[in-house]
Image: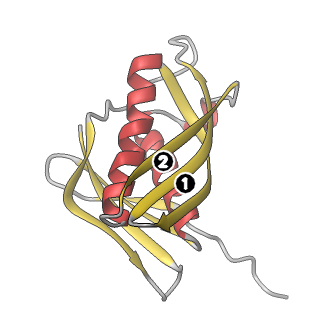
């Protein structure tokens, strides 16, 4: 009998004044999905967020690396949270492609409008930062590993 392997998506890491997150994935797309889920777990209990609204997200930038793309991805999710008063719990990154000096991310996200009667906001995240930012192939337990510190 083989014990079922528990796959960790993310974990909080200690930081003096902000909140740190380490996240994992077997693909770079899964890594970005888990970074989004981890960020929203800082904001609210993900189990309380229903996938009532679905949206598509597309990001295109000059190929400066996965770290810059990760910051843009998390900033886009925070922008939607702030401007549209929405909490997100579903993150499906369809593709991350490098082509002709550009990087493109295509994703589907889901969540619902904030309901003060059901949702308790734990911590307001202001922004993901470049401090200690990392996206790399891990090779030990997961194929990809990342780290980000959030300004709160």
Residue 21 lies in quadrant: bottom left
Q: Callout 2: helix, strand or loop? A: helix
Residue 80 at x, y = what percent? 45, 27
Question: Dot 1, crowdedness within 10 Å: few (<14), some or many (≥20)?
Answer: many
Identify the image quadrant of the C terminus.
top left
Q: Nearer the viewer, residue 36 or 56?
A: 56
How many numbered callouts? 2
Residue at 46 percent across and 17 percent down: it is: 85
Q: Callout 1: helix, strand or loop? A: helix
Q: Nearer the viewer, residue 92 or 2?
A: 92
Q: Are marks 1 and 2 in contact (CB under 8 Å)?
A: yes
128 relative to 98 in the view: left or right = left
**Numbered label attached to residue 86:** none
Q: Is residue 86 above or below residue 18?
A: above
Residue 102 at x, y = what percent? 41, 60
Residue 105 at x, y = what percent? 51, 53
Q: Is residue 139 above or below residue 101?
A: below
Circle 1 sits on which residue? 33
74 relative to 30 in the view: left or right = left
Q: CA distance from mark 1 to mark 2?
A: 5 Å
Residue at 68 percent across and 77 percent down: it is: 5
Residue 62 at x, y = what percent? 34, 57
Circle 2 sits on which residue? 36
């Amino acid at each position: 009998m083989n014990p079922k392997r528990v796959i960790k998506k993310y974990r909080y890491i200690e930081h003096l004044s902000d909140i740190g997150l380490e996240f994992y994935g077997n693909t770079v797309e899964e890594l970005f999905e888990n970074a989004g889920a981890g960020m929203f777990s800082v904001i609210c209990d993900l189990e309380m967020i229903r996938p009532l609204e679905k949206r598509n997200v597309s990001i295109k930038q000059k190929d400066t690396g996965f770290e810059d793309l990760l910051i843009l991805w998390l900033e886009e999710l925070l922008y939607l949270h702030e401007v549209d008063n929405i909490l997100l719990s579903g993150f499906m990154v369809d593709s991350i492609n490098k082509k002709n000096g550009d990087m493109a991310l295509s994703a589907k996200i889901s969540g619902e409008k904030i309901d003060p009667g059901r949702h308790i906001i734990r911590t307001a995240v202001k922004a993901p930062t470049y401090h200690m930012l990392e996206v790399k192939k891990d090779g030990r337990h997961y194929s990809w590993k990342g780290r980000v510190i959030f300004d709160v």
